[in-house]
Image (cartoon, coloured by chain):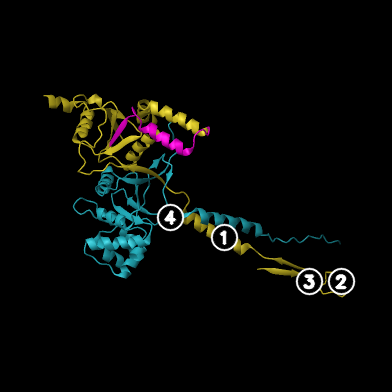
Chain colours: A yellow, B cyan
């Protein structure tokens, strides 16, 4: 629908010079806009803008050849075991499980006031160090690389807790991610995902029955 | 009688500016977006605070749906064909070039190897419908998933494994997949999550 408007006869004639018509070119862009809009709609509907986030984890090797000597023992005072049970419930115990006392297993939650508060308290030293480091980075005293290096050193340093995450078959994938998330939030550098042992299953059952099982075992 | 002259106004709007804007928007969308991959099952990933972006190339993504079906996809078509040939060899199945061509075009695959030939013979629409019913077997007796991953790794050593699972998936399924990966000494992998804004300070 392009149209060319020529105003003939309107122009003044120069002395017998060549007649130059003044052409004003009007192109109607409406169809062009229509087409572009269609394309935009197509791109908006068929594409995803944001790339998904990811979480990197490394699992321990389950090579049978690894001997006891190669394994590093975790100090009982630094060990925390999380047991993700079904129905969005989470249990934890510290150190070596006490099968006789059902109260050694603590029921917690995925809320900030539950597991996170506990882990932040246990890891308070590392958390405060990381906070300092973050401040330093904000003040541009250290570079990003140094920050990452030092932060990982602090997270894996002495005295930081080691968390063993064990999940029940009824726990969901979301539970696992939530637990891993808490590790990231609470700056826990040493954590591992492990398999449930019959001991943990017993502990949970014992907790739910308020110590009935251990009483029976004693009798 | 004097006539009231009504000025004739032309209602033509200059669309040039509008066109400029739309072209700009179009360019923006074309450059920033990536196409959504066709997935046989709807998967809602759980949210996490992790801010690492997934790399773009050399990805072997493992898709796990809530009922525990496992699907796989790779981003390089050449690798896909090579993997298929290698997996076929382990199960004594040879694929014709036509079948390989069809396999290349699949965005996600996840069919037991003995059904693969029949599956590849189907039309694309029928494949889409059927794929959601299958899934790669992961049980310990017939762990084809392990074979696929092993051969994919043999094809491309720079492959990164990414697990994309629905948030309601029972841990049992995840455990099976993780154990299979551990058996193959694939100890590092990525878990795909959605973004959640939260920090230690509540």
Between the C-alphas of marks 2 and 1, the distance is 45 Å
Q: Residues within 10 Å of mark 4 (few under 14, many from 20)?
A: few
Q: Is residue A111 visible?
A: no
Which residue is disc 2 drawn over? A14
Instruction: Tell whether label 4 touches label 3 (CB within 8 Å).
Output: no
Residue B88's label in the rendered image is none
Residue A21's label in the rendered image is 3
Check disc 2 and report its element: helix, strand or loop. loop
Q: Residue at x 48, y 55 (%)?
A: A45
Between the C-alphas of marks 1 and 3, the distance is 34 Å
Between the C-alphas of marks 2 and 4, the distance is 65 Å
Q: Position of residue B116 (x, y in %)?
A: 27, 63
Q: Are marks 2 and 4 on the same chain?
A: no
Task: Give the camera-side residue of A144 and A115.
Answer: A144
Residue B36's label in the rendered image is 4
Q: Residue at x 42, y 36 (%)?
A: A149
Between the C-alphas of marks 1 and 4, the distance is 21 Å
Which span is picked out in magenta? A139-165
């Amino acid at each position: 629908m392009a149209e060319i408007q020529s105003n003939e006869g309107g122009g003044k004639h120069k002395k017998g010079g060549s007649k130059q018509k003044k052409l004003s070119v009007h192109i109607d862009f409406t169809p062009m806009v229509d087409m572009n809009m269609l394309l935009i709609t197509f791109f908006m509907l068929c594409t995803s803008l944001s790339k998904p986030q990811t979480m990197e984890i490394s699992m321990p090797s389950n090579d049978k050849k690894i001997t006891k000597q190669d394994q590093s023992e975790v100090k009982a005072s630094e060990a925390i075991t999380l047991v993700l049970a079904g129905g969005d419930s989470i249990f934890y115990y510290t150190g070596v499980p006490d099968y006789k006392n059902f109260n050694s297993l603590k029921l917690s939650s995925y809320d900030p006031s539950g597991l996170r508060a506990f882990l932040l308290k246990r890891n308070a030293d590392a958390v405060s160090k990381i906070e300092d480091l973050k401040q330093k980075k904000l003040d541009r005293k250290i570079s990003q690389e140094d920050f990452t290096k030092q932060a990982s050193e602090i997270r894996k340093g002495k005295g930081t807790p080691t968390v063993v995450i064990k999940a029940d078959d009824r726990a969901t994938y979301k539970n696992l991610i939530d637990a891993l998330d808490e590790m990231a939030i609470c700056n826990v550098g040493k954590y591992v995902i492990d398999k449930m042992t019959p001991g943990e299953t017993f502990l949970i059952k014992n907790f739910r029955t308020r110590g009935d099982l251990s009483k029976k075992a004693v009798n | 009688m004097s006539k009231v002259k009504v000025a004739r106004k032309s209602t033509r709007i200059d669309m040039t500016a509008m066109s400029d804007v739309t072209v700009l928007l179009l360019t923006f969308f074309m450059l920033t977006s990536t196409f959504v991959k066709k997935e046989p099952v709807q998967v809602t990933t759980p949210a996490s605070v992790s801010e690492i972006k997934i790399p773009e190339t050399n990805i072997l993504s493992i898709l796990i749906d809530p009922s525990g079906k496992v699907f796989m996809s790779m981003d390089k078509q050449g690798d896909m064909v090579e993997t298929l040939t290698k997996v076929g060899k382990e199960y004594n199945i040879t694929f014709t070039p036509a079948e390989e061509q069809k396999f290349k075009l699949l965005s996600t695959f996840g069919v037991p190897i003995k059904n693969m030939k029949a599956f590849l013979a189907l039309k694309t629409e029928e494949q889409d419908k059927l794929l959601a019913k299958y899934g790669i077997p992961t049980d310990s007796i017939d762990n084809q998933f392990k074979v696929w991953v092993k051969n994919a790794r043999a094809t491309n050593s720079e492959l990164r494994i990414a697990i994309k699972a629905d948030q309601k998936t029972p841990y049992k399924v995840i455990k099976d997949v993780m154990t299979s990966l551990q058996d193959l000494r694939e100890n590092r992998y990525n878990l795909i999550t959605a973004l959640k804004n939260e920090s230690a300070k509540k």
